């Protein structure tokens, strides 16, 4: 192989590793289409953009953690149920007139512990994470419904408006606090994933676990930490969502587990692990949020969301297969 061929091969390999390029293109095409083809161009209205940032940030905070977990080669299908359980914990503790900062810390610890449990079941029990977290998904949803009685529980934040504004307030009178937290978490995880030694461990474990172990990487520990990160971020999203809604419902997060996986895959994360990047995951999540928003603007029945997201999941899987085959041909 001559120098030119080697150079082209390296370029193609680099291109397929930066799968966020395709995600960015998809995102821009979607924005352009919705800008020109929504009724009265409602998509670009400031109110709609603000709503996207308000509602989309909660979902995306979970996706960036779940995407990192998928890069290490594991899944967490319990995110929706854990979101509901952590919301219940937060509301119940808040009703006990405890310090709101302490309540928030306890809720975040609760999410992290649940994530650790998922990680231990998967790594120490040698159970596929898809199956393990499918079981915990049902467990936590059932527990939440049982202990809450399935009723809606209000959250009174009238005495803690300043504290609540840190989660659901506005920066410069427009930019939601949720989006600020999202950007902060995305930057932190992005730096860890792409600029820190732990990120190298994540990619190595997801790409070839046996090879990673031969390099003295504690793959079980890496996976458990990634599960804990997911649990922590789900709990944080639960705090934000509960403040925003001003109430708890045992139905929150229903169906989010598969939308989270679809968002990560649309963002270029491999279902097999070892490939993905934080920028792509971030944009992939907002693609899902924007599509859902477009269905609302179009005033289509809610049932259409199941049809659309079913197609998105199938498309995501086929896209993942295409990228993997393209990379193998290049390599």
Image (cartoon, rainbow, N blue to C red):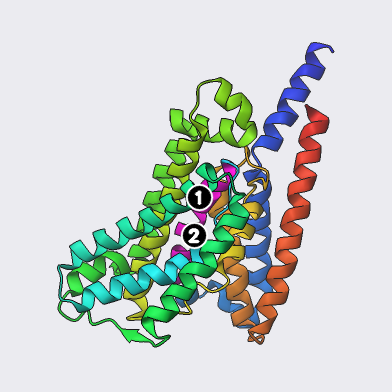
Label 2: state its secondary structure: helix
Q: Is residue 201 above or below residue 6?
A: below
**Closer to us: 248 or 148:** 148
Please identify the quadrant where the N terminus is shown. Answer: top right
* Number of numbered markers: 2
Label 1: state its secondary structure: helix
Q: Mark 2: few, some, or many residues within 10 Å (few <14, many ≥20)?
A: many
Q: Is residue 225 magenta?
A: no
What is the spatial separation of the Cα atoms under label 1 and label 2, in whole angstroms? 26 Å
**Closer to us: 76 or 66:** 76
Residue placed under numbered mark 2 in the picture: 60
Residue placed under numbered mark 1 in the picture: 121
Q: Is residue 64 magenta?
A: yes
Q: Write down the region rendered in magenta.
A: 52-71
* Image position of 262 (left or right of 109): right
Q: Is residue 219 above or below residue 256?
A: above
Task: Identify the residue shown where x is 73% and y is 75%.
Answer: 307
Please identify the quadrant where the C terminus is shown. Answer: top right
- Contact flag, marks 1 and 2 (Cβ < 8 Å): no
Task: Identify the residue shown where x is 58% and y is 51%.
Answer: 129
Q: Position of residue 154 (x, y in %)?
A: 30, 85
Q: Position of residue 229 (x, y in %)?
A: 42, 49
Res 297 quadrant in image: bottom right
Report the mark closest to the observer, 1 or 2.
1
- Sequence-wise, which precedes: disc 1 or disc 2? 2
Q: Position of residue 83 (x, y in %)?
A: 43, 67
């Amino acid at each position: 192989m001559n120098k030119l061929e080697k150079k082209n091969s390296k370029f193609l390999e680099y291109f397929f590793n930066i799968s966020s390029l395709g995600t960015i293109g998809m995102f821009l095409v979607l924005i352009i289409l919705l800008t020109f083809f929504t009724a009265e161009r409602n998509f670009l209205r400031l109110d709609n953009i603000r709503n996207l940032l308000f509602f989309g940030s909660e979902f995306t905070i979970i996706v960036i953690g779940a995407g990192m977990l998928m890069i290490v080669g594991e899944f967490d299908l319990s995110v929706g149920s854990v979101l509901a359980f952590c919301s219940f914990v937060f509301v119940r503790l808040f009703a006990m007139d405890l310090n709101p900062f302490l309540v928030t810390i306890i809720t975040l610890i609760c999410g992290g512990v649940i994530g650790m449990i998922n990680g231990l079941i998967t790594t120490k029990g040698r159970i596929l994470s898809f199956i393990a977290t499918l079981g915990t998904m049902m467990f936590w949803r059932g527990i939440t419904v049982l202990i809450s009685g399935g009723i809606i529980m209000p959250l009174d934040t009238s005495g803690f408006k300043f504290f609540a504004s840190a989660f659901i307030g506005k920066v410069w009178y427009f930019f939601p606090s949720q989006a600020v937290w999202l950007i902060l978490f995305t930057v932190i995880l992005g730096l860890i994933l792409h600029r820190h030694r732990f990120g190298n461990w994540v990619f190595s474990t997801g790409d070839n676990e046996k090879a990673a172990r031969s390099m003295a990487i504690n793959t079980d520990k890496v996976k458990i930490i990634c599960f804990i990160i997911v649990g922590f971020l789900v709990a944080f999203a639960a705090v934000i969502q509960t403040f925003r809604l001003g109430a708890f419902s045992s139905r929150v997060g229903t169906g989010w587990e598969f939308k989270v996986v679809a968002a990560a895959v649309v963002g270029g994360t491999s279902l097999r692990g070892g490939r993905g990047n934080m920028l792509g995951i971030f944009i992939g999540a907002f693609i899902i949020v924007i599509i859902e928003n477009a269905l609302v603007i179009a005033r289509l029945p809610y049932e259409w969301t199941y049809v659309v997201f079913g197609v998105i999941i199938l498309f995501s899987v086929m896209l993942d297969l295409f990228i993997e085959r393209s990379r193998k041909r290049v390599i």
